[in-house]
Amino acid sequence: AIFAQIFAVTIAILLSYIPNAEPWFRSALAPAIVIPGMALLGIIHPPAGAAAIVFSSGKFRWEHFGIFLSGVVISIITAVGINNMSDKRQYPTSWYLLNKAKINLSK
């Protein structure tokens, strides 16, 4: 989710630098570029398409990107914490470092 948001917002802000482009055109072009780009990179995250529309409007710049990204990180940390409160669901389960830590703790 984080990589998709970074990709989408970066493309959208770069599109806002197109001179003499109407806002409606940038708002249509941003998800048209971002969605196939995310598919090619294998980082599909539908809310990133919406973020591309918002940031391509030209009202938000790079200084807003950090605030937006910190909100994304906080929401992911919250979601992982709530998910891991259940004994039936644990996330992440397949990360290399997590599996290595489990092996080292079981020795």
Image: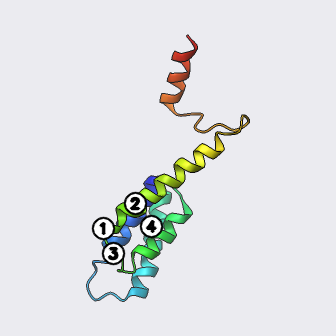
Q: CA distance from mark 2 to mark 4?
A: 8 Å
Q: Which residue is mark 3?
A: 15
Q: Earlier in the sequence, mark 1 or mark 2?
A: 2
Q: Which residue is mark 2?
A: 7
Q: Earlier in the sequence, mark 2 or mark 4?
A: 2
Q: CA distance from mark 4 to mark 1?
A: 17 Å
- Pointers 2 and 4 in contact (CB under 8 A)? yes
Q: Secondary structure at mark 4?
A: helix
Above-or-below relation of 69 to 51: above
Q: Residue at x 36, y 89 (%)?
A: 22
Amino acid found under the numbered disc labelled 4:
Val
Q: Earlier in the sequence, mark 3 or mark 4?
A: 3
User: Residue 66: image x %, image y %?
Assistant: 35, 61
Amino acid found under the numbered disc labelled 1:
Trp
Q: Residue at x 44, y 62 (%)?
A: 37
**Residue 29 appears in which quarter of the rendering?**
bottom left
Q: Which residue is mark 4?
A: 34
**Residue 69 appears in which quarter of the rendering?**
bottom left
Q: Please tell me which residue lies in front, 52 or 35.
A: 52
Q: Which residue is mark 1?
A: 62
- Pointers 3 and 4 in contact (CB under 8 A)? no
Q: CA distance from mark 3 to mark 4?
A: 11 Å
